[in-house]
Image: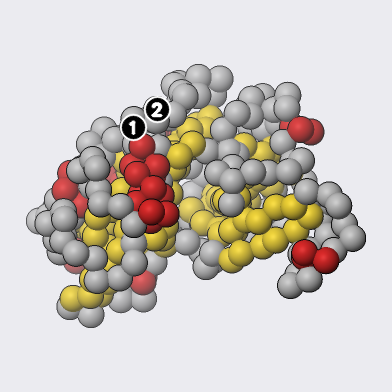
Amino acid sequence: MPNIKTKFLTDRTKYIDQSNIVGDNYSSMFIGKKSGDTEIIFRKIGTNIELGRTHNRVVLAGSQFTAMRHFDLPELLALPTYNQDLSLDHSLAHGTTPENAPKICLFCCGTGGCGPENSQVYTERYVGRINPHTELIPFQYRLPQDDLTATEREKYFGRKSTNERIAYYFKRFETEPEMHARFVDGTLLDNSAYDSVNKSDAEFYVEMSMRITKEDFRDYFRAVTGINDAKVNSISLLTAWYTQADGYIWYQDIIPMTQLNIPNEPLIDLTKGIDIIYHIYY
């Protein structure tokens, strides 16, 4: 059976070690989440044993994205998109009128979030992102004669093709986002919330999950630096909208919404996978 770990990823947690990812403020983190908070929970797969919780950081591009949607404002900063910097296939010019509503819909991973030691996790920069040229790593890195199937391409995006390799830098969520509403004591909210006798505070959040499988990233490290270097230590949620061409979906204006740096997560074990579950509070 594949060795898959589940991780619920929130940013101020202190990482003790890989088996005890729990911060000093662990007990205070779960009382009345407020708008803008996130919660990302690490847990051993198949068990209720949590390895810890942390939260990520909304970055500049994500802040502008949110403000534009909240107030129907035009773009203030023409920040570069991953489409531009990576010269992704079928990318339209930045500024093209979206054919559908841009939303949080993809994620990516990188290797620039931590130093050689797991204690050397770098603080995320608000004016930053996973660098597309030095840190971003493709989930799939295929030879042209071994490209992804049509079914696989319903999950992997950000395609960049050359004569030597076809890279897919982004991936869809494993589960569709779902809304949840509850009092902080765990009681679920319903349509009669205004008349409830429960006087505790309440929380409203969206949950979605992501998955790094045993097939992800390995081909890239094998081809470029060697499997012993295989790891991830940075994760980012991405916003985009899409077009359709040649029977496939092509995401446009891909920019980061959040970034989370974590201790080095080695991927040398070829059976290892990671489940990541995000809670975003409103």
Q: Residue at x 59, y 52 (%)?
A: 282
183 left or right, relative to 163: right
List x then y, in percent, for residue 115.
44, 21
List x then y, in percent, for residue 124.
44, 29
Residue at numbered disc 1: 128
Per the image, label 1 sits on a secondary structure element best described as loop
Q: Quadrant of residue 231?
A: top left
Task: Judge whether 80 appears above or below 134 on screen.
Answer: below
Q: Judge the density around disc 2: few (<14), some (14-19), many (≥20) Cα neighbours within 10 Å.
A: few
Front residue of this view, candidates 25 and 195: 195
Q: Residue at x 16, y 48 (%)?
A: 84
Q: Is residue 89 visible?
A: no
Disc number placed over residue 125 in the picture, else none: 2
CA gap between label 1 and label 2 equals 5 Å
Q: Residue at x 72, y 36 (%)?
A: 29
Q: Amino acid at mark 1?
A: Gly
